[in-house]
Image: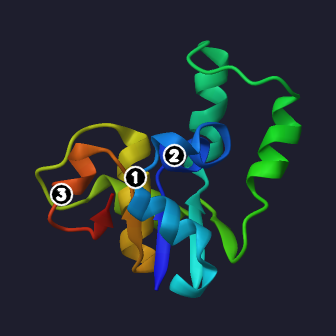
Amino acid sequence: MKYLLDTHTWIWWYMNPRKLSHRVTNLIGDTTRYDELLLSAISPWEFCKLLEKGRIAISCNPEDWLNAAFDLPKFRLVPLSPVLAYGSTVLPQPFHNDPADQIIVATALQEDATILTKDRNILEYEHVKSLW
């Protein structure tokens, strides 16, 4: 089984794990429950945009934070390939217009992964597996 961390799930795992559901916390913490833990390449960009806009703050160098945040067991960063970029533009409708969410959903579909997210738009999207 593969799980794809939504951007907020990945950030909260390092910054404020109390925001995660017990189900997600237990799942991420038990490496026997998954084969791979994935992160879309769009998520580090979203994190940096949140820093840029002052919506989150960290007390260390952002590059150090990013390197530490990639240090998860069975972790793989999924690059944004041209095929994946295209897939994000042809998702079955209806789905909302947030490009980062479209890329995350397309990544989960390509990887046959379940998205770990609190995002209601993704949780209610019937074409992808998700849980919170």
Image mark for residue 90: none
What colour-coding does the image apply?
rainbow
Residue name at image x 31 percent, y 44 percent: 119
Mark 3 vs 2, N-terminal side: 2
| Quadrant of the image occupied by residue 12 | top right
Q: From where the camera sits, is residue 115 visible?
A: yes
Which residue is under mark 2?
Answer: 7
User: Label 3: how many residues lie within 10 Å, few (<14), some (14-19) or many (20+)?
Assistant: some
Q: What's the residue type where badge 3 is placed?
A: Tyr
57 vs 129, left or right, is right
How far is mark 1 from mark 3, CA to CA? Answer: 19 Å
Q: What's the residue type where badge 2 is placed?
A: Thr
Which residue is under mark 1?
Answer: 21
Q: Are marks 1 and 2 in contact (CB under 8 Å)?
A: no
| Quadrant of the image occupied by residue 74 | bottom right
Residue 54 locus on image (x, y percent) = 61, 12
Does residue 132 sit above or below 27 in this rendering?
Answer: above
Nearer to us of marks 1 and 3 is: 1
| Quadrant of the image occupied by residue 91 | bottom left
Q: Are marks 3 and 2 in contact (CB under 8 Å)?
A: no
Q: Secondary structure at mark 2?
A: helix
Which residue is under mark 3?
Answer: 125
Q: Secondary structure at mark 3?
A: loop
How far is mark 3 from mark 2, CA to CA? Answer: 17 Å
Residue name at image x 63 percent, y 62 percent: 79
